[in-house]
Amino acid sequence: METLELFSISELKDLIRQVVKEEIEVQGRKPFMDIGETAKYLGISINTLYAWNNENRIAYYKPDGKKNYYKLEDLENYVLNDKHRVKSHEEFKTEMTTQMVLKQLRKKK
């Protein structure tokens, strides 16, 4: 006879997240991509990607000394890096206002 295990809502959510994560990895997201797949993923040409390699802008692996491979996690970190983020108009305006106020305060000292 089978037994029924009871889970909390939190445990069920965690289990579902884990299953979904594993399914995504199995179905289409390889941990490494070749240069063509990487260029397509980033929306750039292969020539641009080679140029980025030469500039050390993006991490890559060359296990056989011939082909370049890119770790998906490295690509996501590169794309989501804050130095590549363009600030919104409001963020820019707030930053400029803060800088102006600080400049005025320094002049008063």
Image (cartoon, grey):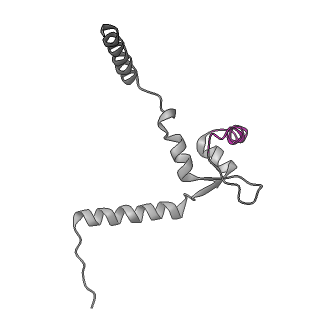
Q: Which of 13 and 83 is in front in this view?
A: 83
Residue ID at (40%, 21%): 92
> Residue 15 appears at what percent x and percent y?
34, 66
Q: Main secondary structure of the magenta part?
A: helix
The magenta-colored residue range is 44-58
Give the number of marks. 0
> Residue 51 appears at what percent x and percent y?
71, 38
Residue lying furthest top in this view?
Answer: 108
Q: Is residue 26 left or right of residue 39?
A: left
Quadrant of the rendering where the N terminus is positioned: bottom left
Q: In this view, does 41 lie to the left or right of 2?
A: right
Residue lying furthest bottom in this view?
Answer: 1
Residue ID at (71%, 40%): 54
Magenta segment includes 70: no
> Where 24 sits versus 45, above or below?
below
Q: Which of 50 and 99 is in front in this view?
A: 99
Residue lying furthest right in this view?
Answer: 66
> Residue 81 appears at what percent x and percent y?
49, 39
> Where 24 sits versus 40, above or below?
below
> Where 89 sits versus 65, above or below?
above
Q: Nearer the viewer, residue 52 or 32?
A: 52
Q: Using the rendered view, name the quadrant where residue 109 is placed.
A: top left
Residue ID at (55%, 59%): 28
Q: Using the rendered view, name the quadrant where residue 66 is placed.
A: bottom right
> Where 31 sits versus 51, above or below?
below
Magenta segment includes 56: yes
Residue ID at (47%, 28%): 86
